[in-house]
Amino acid sequence: MTTVEDFHAHHDDWPWNPPRPGRATFHYLILVTEGALRHDVDHVTRTVAPGQWLWVRAGHVQCWHDPSTARGPFVLFEPEVLRPETARLLAPLTSHDAPAVLTPHPDDVPWLEQTAFQLLDEHRALGRRSLAAHHALRCSLLETLLVRLAHSPGTSGPPTDAAIGSSGSSPHTGTTTGRRHTYERFVDALELHFRELHRVDDYAQMLGCSVRTLSRAAQAATGKRAREIVNERQLLEARRLLGHSRWTAHAVAAHLGFADAANFGRFFRHHTGLTPAAYRARQTAPDS
C-alpha cells in the first residue's frame, strides 16, 4: 500500500523512462484524486481522471507512463488474500476481460476514497497494535473497498441480466437467466482451458449443451459468436507474451496448443494483420 506520488518518487525513472511493458503477477488498484494517470493495459492506453479507479488484474500486461501529475492511493494485493466468499462477489470485476478503468457512482466516491486512505493509514501504522490485529484490519478494509467498488451502481462491468434481455434474447426470465448461466460457465471453462481446447464443440461437450445453445448464450451476452470469444482469448494471451517477454513465436505456439509455429503464425496474422515477429517488434520499439 502506497500512493502514486510516493511510488513515483521512490522509483526515480523506473519503470516509465523508457516505458517497459511487464506482466502483473498481482492486482494493481489505483484511485486518482488529482491530475490524470495514463497507463497501458494489454497494450491499450487508458486515461484515468480524478474520482476514477484503475484496476490492473493479475495476468494483464501493463506499461507505466510518467505519473508525475497524478495523485492518489495505490493498492497492490495478491488474489489469494481475499476470502472465498468475497472472491465470489468480486468475480465479475476480477476476470481478465473486466474494464480497466472504473467510474463509481458519485454517492460512493467519497466513501471509497475514505476507505482507501484508511487502508493506507493502517498499512503505515505497523507497530501501533498487534500484528494479527494489524493484518486483520488491512484485510477487512481491503475487502470493504473492493466490494463497494465492484458493486457501486455507476461501476461498469460485464453485461447484466437486464442488458442481456435488451440485446435481443428471449423476454422470458428463465431463458435469459439460463443463457447468462451458460455463458458464465463457458467463460470459466475457457479461462481454464483456452491453451489446449480451441474448438467451440469442445466447450459445448464440457458444459453438456449443444454448440447452438452455447453460441446463442455467447451472442446474447456479448454480441459475439462463441468462436470469436475463443479466438480473442488466445490472441490476448499471444499479445501478452509477444509484447513484453522473450518468448519466441515457437514458444507461444506451443504454449497455446498450436500444432506448430507456422499454424500459429497464420492464425495470428489472419486476426491482427501482422506476423508474430512484426507485432513483437512494434510493441518493443522505443517509441511504441
Image: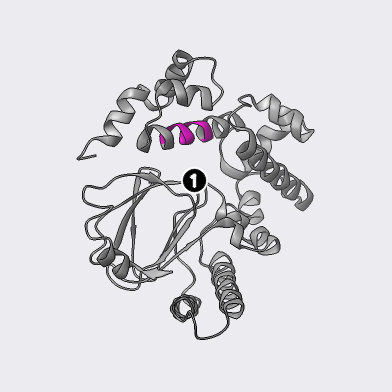
- The quadrant in which the N terminus is found is bottom left
Asked if 153 appears above or below 175 in the picture, the reply is below
Give the residues drawn in magenta, as a range. Answer: 233-239
Left or right: 177 as drawn, with respect to 58? right
Look at the numbered disc 1 and give the secondary structure of its residue: loop
Quarter of image, res 220: top right
Asked if 23 appears above or below 152 in the picture, the reply is above
Quarter of image, res 87: bottom right
Whether residue 234 appears in magenta in the rendering, the answer is yes
Percent x, y for residue 92? 60, 55
Asked if 41 appears above or below 197 in the picture, the reply is below
Q: Name the residue under label 1.
A: 59
Can the viewer see residue 274? no
Can the viewer see residue 21? yes
Percent x, y for residue 227? 59, 28
Quarter of image, res 36: bottom left
Magenta: main secondary structure equals helix
Q: Which amino acid does label 1 sit on?
A: Gly
Q: Residue furthest bottom?
A: 128
